[in-house]
Each structure stands twice: as C-alpha cells, then as structure tokens.
Image: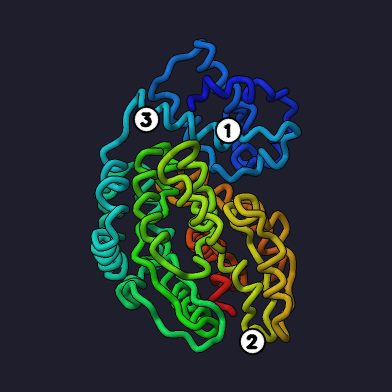
Amino acid sequence: MSIAERYEEIAHCNRCGFCQAACPIFRSTGHEAGVARGRLALLRALIEGRIEWSPELEAPLYTCLLCGACTSNCFPAIATGELVVQARAEYLQKVGRTSIHRLLFDRLLPHPRRLHLAARAAALGKNSGASRLARALGLLRVFGPDFAHAEEIVDSLPTQPLRVRYPEGIYPGQGAGPAVAYFVGCGVDVVQTAAGAATLKLLRRHCSSVQVLGTNCCGLPAFSYGDREAARRLAAKNLEILAATGAAAVVTDCSSCAGFIKSYPRLFSGGHPLSAAARAAAARTQDASEWLQSAPPAESGRLRGRRVTFHDPCHAVRGQGILSEPRRLLQRQPGATFVELAEADWCCGGAGSYALSHYELAMRVLDRKMENLKKSEADLVVTTCPACILQLAHGVRRHGLAVEVRHLTEVL
C-alpha cells in the first residue's frame, strides 16, 4: 500500500497541535516540520503533487523517532509512524538506497557470523582506543558527519558475542516450567551480553530447558529505514526457525525485537504464504518482562538500599502495551525504593541507530531525559531495550551522574 492509498487517513489530521505536546523532536527543535501534523502535511502535499520526491525530503522523513507518542496524543489516532515508514519506502524506491544500508541490510544482518566478525573488529578498535584516534583524525567522517560523534556513545564493547559463549542449541534447565526458546537480538548478542547472560540464567532457573535460537536480525532496522523487502527476508528466515521449535513460548529480552516479531502478521498480511507462520510466531512471543510475570525471580535483596526507577522503551509501552509489568517486578524487591520517573515513556533518543545520522537531535532528546532522571534522585535506572541502555548510559556519563543503568534481567 502506498501513502496515496492512505490519503483519507492522512486527511483526518485536523491540525489541532496536540501532537506538539508529546513529540520529543518538536519539543527539542520547535520546528513544525518535526511534528506529526507537519509530517502529515508533507505527505499530503506529495500525494497531491504540490511537491516532488527529491533528496531534500530525507531530513523531514528520517528525523522522526517513530516513537508513536504522537498517535497516543491524537484524537483520530492517526498512525503517523506507520505512514512515515511507508513514505520512507517510497523515498527509497524513487530516490534510492545508500551503499552503507545495502551492506548492512543485505550483507551483514542476515548473517550472524558476519555480524560477529564485525562486532569483534569494532570491539578491538573501541577497547584499544583506535576508534578514538580515528575520530580525532577525521577518518570516521566517511560514514557520515554524525558518525564520529555517535562513536562516543558506546563506552566499551564485549570481546565475545553472547551466541559465541552460548551457541544455538538446547540447554537443560533447573526448573519445572515448560521449555522455552530464547530469541537473541543483535543488540544483546554483540553489545549487552551481560543482559543476555542474565536472561538465560533466569530462563534456565525456571524452565525444564531453554533453546537458544539460531535466528538473525528481527528485521526492525530495515523496516524502520523503509526497506520492507529486506525486513521480510530477515523475518522469513526467523519464521522458519521459530516454526521448527516446539517450545511453549519464545522469549526475548529486547523490547524492540519482541514488538516487531509480534507485528510479523502485518508484514505478511493477506494471502501471503507465511501469514499463518507469522501469526503463530506473534502469538508465542513474549517480552522478558511479560514472561517474568509467570516466573517471578526470588527476592534476592540485591537491590536493598537502592533507589530504583524505570525507563519505558517505546517498543514496550506503546508497541506492546507493557507498562505495569516491569514496575511490579521491581517494587517487590525487598529493601528497594521504587520511584516513578517523570516522562518515563518519553523516547530517550536512542531509537536504534538514530544517533548515527542525527547525533545533535538525539542528544537534545537525551538531555531532557537526564534532567528528569536527576529530579528522581534514583541511583539505578532499569529498562528492557539495548539501544535505550546505550543511550541512557551515555547520558549518565555526559551529565556526570552517579547512576547505574541496567537491563531488568540483570538486576533480577
């Protein structure tokens, strides 16, 4: 479906401006082009032929975080994020893909072993200081003007991916719970490996067995960029693997992966041959915070004396409707003081790889989050998205805060 086929939906925007109050980009810039009604006006002008497709459209189309806050604040509930993604797809068809995105979506993400090699090279460069030297010499500008700045977001990288430490296969558990499958997202696999190890430990503690799946990227990065065919190819490979497992549930500790797998039926809609498999995969997939409701960890007392808060990933709170689940888990920990974070459901500016091409905007959004974190006086902020963890940890260092950033499964 093209954006022209959704003209009536776009035309429902009455330009009331309520989206302004909820949009992190508009609140950071004050520019009308950066808010939902401005983007919808742009799409309407494209459909009506008042403007032409051109490279100048890249900025207004790709500065959207796709956080979904505008739709939550919209009386007709216009799915602006979906419409922007569709417009991005048409932009790629008419203007073209870049070579770096072809490399990422066609050559790297479909092949975990290649991703592991790239991650090891990145870890070597980061941990040795070579990447900082390359940044100082201006060598990273070949990847874009913002890439050099974004390189500093990652403090250090694991030298070994999670799925090298825990290869695909079935691992015995110590519990009486049903067997589950563990979907390892790319971010957890190569960056947040401690979170992955904690998740696997929790799963094995409660389940009779845990199958670490040999899946590739869930497809969300390609889909968000507008490359729907690349997203379908990635998702199709995963569906074959998911269909072959007999596990009662597929658990993932990446809220972005969980949200996108649950949306697979929309990716393979109508009479597509994979539509039934997509529905089955979506029905079995659980965010780790959902799964933990049926298998809550023992009260360890590890958070005793800690002042804890929670940041809601966009793909959890709006993508899946997960809000109270992680809070209940944290509130029941003995000796911990849970405090609510103001604007906890506001995007932190991570949005996957957003900072790689929009560093300054990402930092403005992050600074607002950090100001709220200061007011909470928390010494531990918990979340369930690898990109959010990276972004929040960078914000803590950037603002000089004595705050720890951890994944939910790590602290439990």
Crowd around label 2: few <14 · some 14–19 · many ≥20 (10 Å): few
Q: Nearer the viewer, mark 2 or mark 3?
A: 2
- Residue 125 visible somewhere in the drawing: no
Q: Position of residue 17 (x, y in %)?
A: 72, 30
Identify which residue, 203 or 343, lies in the foreground. 203
On the image, numbered disc 2 is attached to which residue?
A: 298
Q: Position of residue 113 (x, y in %)?
A: 25, 63
Residue depicted at 62% across the width and 78% down the height:
295
Identify which residue, 6 or 389, lies in the foreground. 6
On the image, numbered disc 1 is attached to which residue?
A: 34
Residue type at mark 3 is: Leu
113 relative position to 375: left or right: left
333 relative position to 2: left or right: right
Element at label 1:
helix
Element at label 2:
loop
Gap in angstroms between the C-alphas marked 1 and 3: 20 Å
Residue depicted at 65% across the width and 83% down the height:
303
Q: Nearer the viewer, mark 1 or mark 2?
A: 2
Residue depicted at 70% across the width and 54% down the height:
343
Crowd around label 1: few <14 · some 14–19 · many ≥20 (10 Å): many
Gap in angstroms between the C-alphas marked 2 and 3: 49 Å
On the image, numbered disc 3 is attached to which residue?
A: 92
